[in-house]
Image (spheres, grey):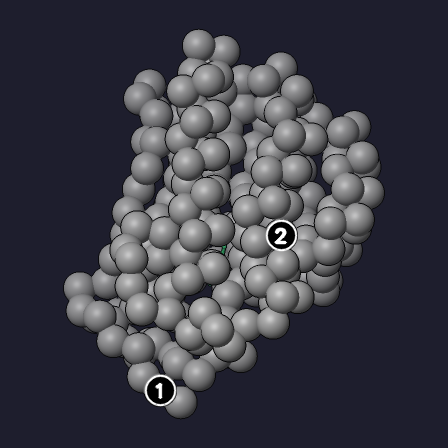
Amino acid sequence: MTERIILTGHTKGIGAEVCKLLAASKKYDVVGIARSQSPIAGIRQFACDLSNSLETQKLCEQLKSENPKYLIVNAGANSIKPAESYSIQEIEHIYQLNLVSPAMLIRACLPALLRNEGHIIVLGSFSALEVRRWNNYYGSAKAGLHHLTKNLFEQYRKQNLRVTLIVPDIVSSDFYAQQEFQPDPSPQYSISPAEVAQLVFDLVEKKTDYVPTEIVIRPQMFKLDRK
Ligand SMILES: NC(=O)c1ccc[n+]([C@@H]2O[C@H](COP(=O)([O-])OP(=O)(O)OC[C@H]3O[C@@H](n4cnc5c(N)ncnc54)[C@H](OP(=O)(O)O)[C@@H]3O)[C@@H](O)[C@H]2O)c1
């Protein structure tokens, strides 16, 4: 039977590159979740704003019958600015999108993932590891997501659930489209979405006996330019 993969944030950046690789392989039944639609043929898509709790709850009900083998938790966003500049709504949005919705989606898919001895692959962030100026709500939301991801492996490893946390530093993607800052796209200073996607694809394709529980990837140099 074709293995089903649920992928959030499949329309841009890392997720779009993962989606391309999965679709090109023609080996998987891919279900993409984002607010917009992807032009990639041969996948099924659910439109959902994952920063909205009610929309995400409805989606979770729909996903219960999807029976995935893989859940790739990739959708995420941030706006880089000082903590006092955020509205209450922006703070809610950041935690909902980067922590609460991932937890809800994982919960909805867990019975199937356990039944199928599946694999949860989570896109965390280097922002969760470093305590740095302006790295406030997003960094702490991702830190919560890291903790949850590691907890799931400890809890379900005996049931053969695989859980992998990927922790990228600067990736040159649409993530910075609305930001005051942007990465230098040269490979010395930022990772390309295609490179991260290849890593995700390899995790799906090449099942090792060991579980890579945490993979940190960083460019050689650090630089973010003010636009
Ligand atoms: N770029 C970096 O430097 C970097 C570094 C570390 C970690 N990460 C993490 O890597 C993951 C992918 O980021 P990326 O760089 O590929 O970003 P991206 O190019 O901005 O793509 C983000 C994806 O998430 C979806 N998304 C955003 N907000 C959403 C919402 N409210 N509801 C549903 N879907 C939403 C977007 O789809 P729609 O717009 O169609 O909804 C898009 O497909 C994120 O979790 C991010 O936190 C990125």
**In front: 165, or 89?**
89
Front residue of 216 and 202? 216
Report the quarter where the C terminus lies: bottom left
Above or below, 139 against 162 in this view is below
Q: Is mark 1 within 8 Å of ligand 1?
A: no
Q: Horizontal and vertical percent for residue 83?
A: 45, 69
Q: Residues within 10 Å of mark 2 (few under 14, many from 20)?
A: many
Check if mark 1's residue and mark 2's residue have beta carbons within 8 Å.
Answer: no
Q: Residues within 10 Å of mark 1 (few under 14, many from 20)?
A: few
Q: Viewer-proximal residue, 206 or 225? A: 225
Q: Position of residue 203 (x, y in %)?
A: 41, 36
On the picture, is 123 further left or further right than 50? left
* Residue 64: image location, x then y, percent: 76, 29
Out of 51 and 7, give the one closest to the viewer: 51
Report the disc number at residue 226.
1
> Which residue is farthest front?
84
Q: State whether residue 209 is above or below residue 73.
A: above
* Kind of residue at disc 1: Arg
Question: In the rendered image, is residue 179 in sight?
Answer: yes
Give coordinates of residue 17: x percent, y percent. 50, 58
Question: What residue did someone put label 2 on?
Answer: 96
**In what quadrant does ligand 1 lie?**
bottom right
**Residue 1's quadrant in the figure?**
top right
